[in-house]
Amino acid sequence: MNQPVTTPAVTWTAGAVARMLDLPPSTLRAWHRRYGLALSAPQTGSHRRYGRADVDALFRMKHLIEQGLGTETAAARAFHADGTTDAGTLLAAVRGLELDTATALLDAYLVDHDVVDTWEHLCRPVFGALCGPDADHCVDLVHGLAWAVAAALHRIPAPRSAAPPVLLACADRDRHTLPLETLRAALAEQGRAALFLGGSIPDTALRDAVARTHPAAVVLWSSRPAAPPRRIRAPRLVLAGPGWPRRTGRALRPASLGEAVALLTTGTR
């Protein structure tokens, strides 16, 4: 009976990896010596061998350092050398009000994950941790995290499109803009152009904007009790956030960021 043929996993030498990273070999050696990088590839000889996962981790580490993260923290983040999770690392940075570090962590996460995944599996857990029993003493941290998230999302460029945009705005007297900034970035990833008007937009101003832009859809966010807007002439009206009543007529009510993206990227081009 023939035995199955196993193909050995591809590995690279330290010199080859240093060239891939565009780093001096001495820097790679120093990283191993100082930070104890845990390699996944089997080490059988006197020279280090790197597998695909190891090379990917080193690229993440280099990217984090280039974004301003300290080398030790970047090593822990890229290799999970201390067993922390992405959310745990971000939470620690925010609690220390190391907001440049927090932004760099978010930038790095967005390299390998889309906006919806980043929001659901990284940002929301950290906001949840900050909004626990000590929420009254964490307002500065929540605002700091919101700033870092917005800064990272602003790096996602708006797509070039001749199609009518999606118009995004916060309801009058509501200034919680981060959910719509996140939606704008998620739509941009899908090639869907969006125009964000910002916080606290009166109905009259919203109607003026609709008349000027002829949007494919209007998304209005409210985190506080609000009445649905009247006389908004757009193909789709989407009311997002917890502030709206149950019955909102023809308006669509997405239950999550992912659902909102799906609604606005189907049949609106």
Image (cartoon, rainbow, N blue to C red):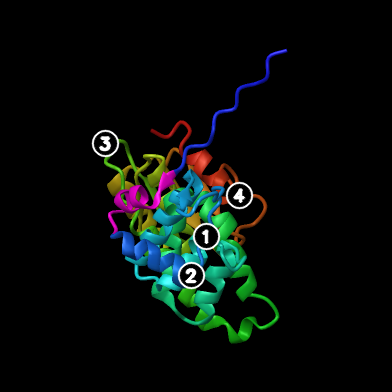
Rendering coords of residue 50 (x, y %):
46, 49
Q: Residue at x 44, y 78 (%)?
A: 98
The C terminus lies in which quarter of the figure?
top left
Mark 4 lies on residue: 248
Q: Are marks 2 and 1 in contact (CB under 8 Å)?
A: yes
Rendering coords of residue 215 (x, y %):
36, 43
- Name which residue type carries label 3: Ala
- Name which residue type carries label 4: Thr
Q: Which mark is drawn over residue 79?
A: 1
Q: Residue at x 54, y 69 (%)?
A: 89
Between residues 203 and 130, which one lies in front from this camera angle?
130
Q: Residue 22 in magenta? A: yes
Sequence order check, earlier mark of 1 and 4 = 1
Q: Secondary structure at mark 3?
A: loop
Q: Is 203 placed left or right of 89 in the picture?
A: left
Q: Secondary structure at mark 4?
A: loop
Q: Secondary structure at mark 1?
A: helix
Q: Are marks 4 and 3 in contact (CB under 8 Å)?
A: no
Q: Which mark is drawn over residue 35?
A: 2
